[in-house]
Image: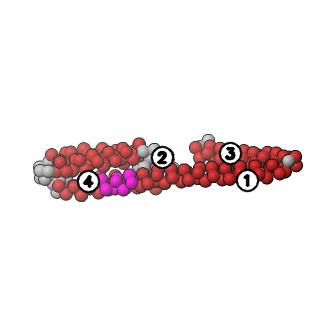
Amino acid sequence: MTHAGTVLLLTFGLFLGMLLCLEIGRRAGIRRMKEDAETMEAGVSAVDGAVFALLGLLIAFTFSGASARFDTRRQLIVEATNHIGTAYLRLDLLSAEAQPALRESFRRYVDARIEANRKLPDMAAAKEHVAQALELQDGIWRQGVAATRAQGAHPSAPMLLLPALNAMIDITTTQLMTPGNGRFGGFIG
């Protein structure tokens, strides 16, 4: 059984359990009302108030947690986009011969990341594109290191491009390890 099927079955079971408990409580309440109606009226309103207060708190905590996870994921996506953009712009520091291959690798890398997101909820297909993106990332690093050492590269290319590539790799690792959404962390929006 798939994860979604298990969750659906568990949700349905909990729903049936709640209905059963409601019916048992209703029958017990009716029996108790017949025995002592006056004290039951006062007790029910206090219980109602407490239950609704707890339900309100539960809903508030749920939305607060979901909002915080969403904001974290959105922030990581923005940071990743900025790091990729910065590294791409700094390719201008390399020799004219080295730039086209690296720019093409960047395009394929971004396409793989976007495609991983599009493949959801098919986790197997999404994982393939994540693996492809990580492989391209390794290639970009190797190409970048070689290109900064090549003749024609700006003298400050290693000091500017390599930290930008490193930041791009680091934020990807952060996204993959960020818990919260069950889909590769924040790597995939």
Q: Is residue 77 found left or right of 31 in the rendered image? A: left
Give percent across and percent down for residue 124: 49, 46
Give percent across and percent down for residue 121: 52, 51
Q: Is residue 17 found left or right of 85 in the rendered image? A: right
Which residue was labeled with disc 2?
180
Kind of residue at badge 4: Ala
Kind of residue at badge 2: Gly
Q: Is mark 2 on a helix, strand or loop?
A: loop
Name the disc covering residue 45, or none.
1
Which residue was labeled with disc 3?
14
For label 1, count other residues whose C-alpha is less than 10 Å away and answer few (under 14), some (14-19) or many (20+). Answer: few
Kind of residue at badge 1: Ser
Residue 82: within the magenta? yes
- Distance of label 3 from label 1 (alpha carbons): 26 Å
How is this picture coloured? secondary structure
Which residue was labeled with disc 4?
87
For label 3, count other residues whose C-alpha is less than 10 Å away and answer few (under 14), some (14-19) or many (20+). Answer: few
